[in-house]
Amino acid sequence: KKLNKLKKELVLQQDEQKRLDEDAKSQKAELESQKQQASELEESYNKLVEEYQKKITELEAQKRSAQVDMNSIRDFVISTNFSGSIESVSGFIHPVQGGSKSAGTWAYPGGGMHLGLDWAAPIGTTVVAPASGVILYAAAPVGSNSGYLGNWSGYPYGGGNTIEMLCNVNDTLYAVSFCHLSQTIYVSAGQSVSQGQAIALSGNSGNSSGPHTHVEVYNLGSMSVSDAVARFSAGADFAWGTGWSGTGTSCEAGKAAPCRERPEKFFS
């Protein structure tokens, strides 16, 4: 009788263990299914984000490439009458006196094309001329802390308060752009500046998500100062013919001058 009783208990235990094993297998299969679904959802989400970023980049490129009414910005653009020369210096100095890099060239940390260097710094941080040169464009049409994503104020569109200048470094001509500045700008178009001279204060204006200065550098090669001034005066093209839609017009990609340089190459 005891043996029969133990046998029945053993059979019950075996049945229960079998049921538990089956439940475990079922739960494992369910977890695998959920894991697969999560993986598929993540992949789908990443594709949507990639497509979204691509469309945003395309829209931004189209907006920045839009023809500007030169009459509306003529007061802020250098005149073709400028006939001065630019002192050649042996190297660039960092234009933003404080802060740290928040986004590099050619992509944002989270993905998406980025055609310049973002240097995060509090509003009011001094911005200096990285080399001696002449101001091609300077305008501050909006508030120092008026920036937000999708804000297309300023010129180029989305730049907020901006400056463009010509520099001569080791006998090579460069154009340098500064965007998202504060409303305090110390220079005007046609003005000559010395390396290290204060030209503006940093801000958060235009298509900006926070206080920073966006810097772009263009290598103009052997172009003369007079030719560069005449070219910019005619169309105020901050991109110097390189466009806003890709990185294929960069110097490191083999594009002949004018071509986009990586600012990090010059600013440590």
Image (tube, grey):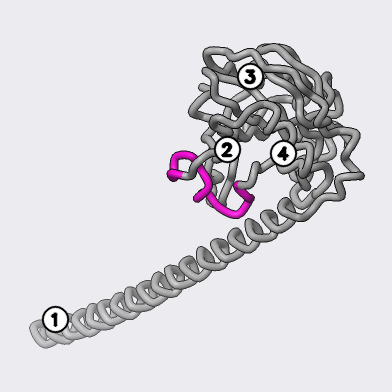
Amino acid tagged 1 = Leu
Q: Residue at x 40, y 70 (%)?
A: 35
> In which quadrant of the rendered view does residue 133 lie?
top right
Identify the secondary structure beneath mark 2: strand
Left or right of 180, for residue 51:
left
Q: Which residue is mark 3?
A: 130
- Disc marking residue 103: 2
Q: Residue at x 57, y 65 (%)?
A: 51
Label 3 packing within 10 angstroms: few (<14), some (14-19), many (20+): many
Pointer 3 or 1: first along the chain: 1
Amino acid tagged 4 = Arg
Q: Which residue is mark 4?
A: 231
Pointer 2 or 3: first along the chain: 2
- 126 w.r.t. 214: above or below: above
Judged by depth in the image, the label closer to the viewer, 3 or 1, is 3
Residue range highlighted in magenta: 242-254
Say whether residue 112 is magenta: no
Q: Which residue is mark 1?
A: 6
Give the Cα distance between marks 4 and 1.
Answer: 100 Å
Amino acid tagged 3 = Pro
Give the Cα distance between marks 3 and 1.
Answer: 91 Å
Give the Cα distance between marks 4 and 3.
Answer: 22 Å
